[in-house]
């Protein structure tokens, strides 16, 4: 196993643990309806763990992935504006600090999810054809993120209204998350050994694609 593969395996194990921590906090928040403060704590803790891991390991791969994720998360604010103010289907808990129409922690929440799935796509690509890696990564995100969205509803972090849904999660979100994940394996491979500026560019493109994916899913599901 070459050094790059060892790094990918190490990162994926770390990301598995960190997502379990995040899901655990979300689950407790859903059980006790803890609201926006718990959401802030959740994302702050996870972001701190990412940074700690990067500094401690001097992890160049995860550094690029994090820059990619944050760039995408900031660009995703346009998609949130579309959902909150134009379609008026997404409603955030009004507590805490906001960036435009989104809680300030949302770019970092997106960063963690996108870099996790991108790393998963790269990990799978080392072991199977690219199309399989892409599909599996998209399926994982299409299941995991809507589950997290359901926990967010019961935790009183945010909710959706006026859209066909499976429980508290709209169908356009379920399909949208699958579509959002489709380019992640490619972007993960694209930025692995390139200059950090390419991670920024890829992140901006992914952030714009989030908006596009939701728009397509909205149309397909009749929302």
Image: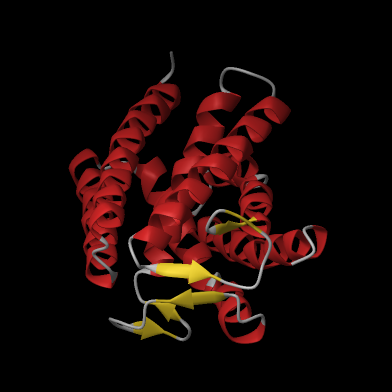
The residue that appears at 77% across and 58% down in the rendered structure is 221
**Which quarter of the figure is the N terminus placed in?**
top left
The residue that appears at 29% across and 41% down in the rendered structure is 18
Between residues 173 and 58, which one lies in front from this camera angle? 173
The residue that appears at 64% across and 53% down in the rendered structure is 180
Tell me which corner region of the image, top left, top right, bottom left or bottom right, holds residue 95: bottom left
Between residues 188 and 19, which one lies in front from this camera angle? 19
**Whether residue 180 is situated above or below residue 99 in the rendered picture:** above
**Whether residue 206 is situated above or below residue 19 in the rendered picture:** below
Side of 45 where 98 appears, left or right: right
How many marks overall? 0
The residue that appears at 44% across and 23% down in the rendered structure is 5
**Whether residue 197 is situated above or below residue 60 in the rendered picture:** below
Q: Residue 41: percent from the left, percent from the top?
A: 21, 62
**Whether residue 71 is situated above or below residue 186 in the rendered picture:** below
Tell me which corner region of the image, top left, top right, bottom left or bottom right, holds residue 204: bottom right
Q: Residue 160: percent from the left, percent from the top?
A: 54, 69
Can residue 67 be seen here?
Answer: no
**Which quarter of the figure is the C terminus placed in?**
bottom right
Between residues 154 and 95, which one lies in front from this camera angle? 154
Q: Residue 98: percent from the left, percent from the top?
A: 37, 83
Side of 206 where 149 appears, left or right: left
Q: Residue 183: percent from the left, percent from the top?
A: 66, 47
């Amino acid at each position: 196993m070459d050094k790059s593969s060892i790094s990918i395996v190490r990162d994926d194990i770390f990301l598995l643990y960190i997502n379990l921590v995040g899901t655990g906090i979300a689950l407790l928040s859903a059980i006790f309806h803890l609201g926006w403060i718990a959401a802030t704590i959740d994302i702050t803790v996870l972001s701190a763990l990412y940074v700690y891991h990067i500094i401690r390991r001097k992890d160049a791969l995860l550094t690029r992935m994090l820059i990619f994720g944050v760039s995408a998360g900031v660009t995703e604010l346009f998609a949130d504006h579309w959902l909150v103010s134009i379609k008026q289907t997404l409603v955030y808990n009004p507590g805490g600090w906001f960036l435009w129409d989104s809680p300030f922690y949302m770019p970092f929440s997106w960063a963690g999810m996108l870099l996790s799935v991108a790393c998963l796509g790269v990990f799978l690509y080392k072991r199977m054809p690219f199309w399989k890696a892409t599909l599996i990564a998209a399926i994982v995100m299409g299941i995991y993120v809507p589950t997290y969205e359901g926990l967010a509803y019961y935790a009183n972090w945010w909710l959706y209204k006026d859209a066909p849904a499976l429980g508290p999660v709209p169908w356009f979100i379920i399909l949208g998350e699958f579509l959002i994940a489709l380019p992640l394996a490619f972007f993960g491979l694209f930025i692995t050994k390139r200059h950090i500026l390419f991670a920024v560019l890829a992140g901006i493109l992914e952030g714009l694609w989030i908006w596009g994916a939701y728009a397509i899913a909205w149309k397909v599901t009749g929302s």
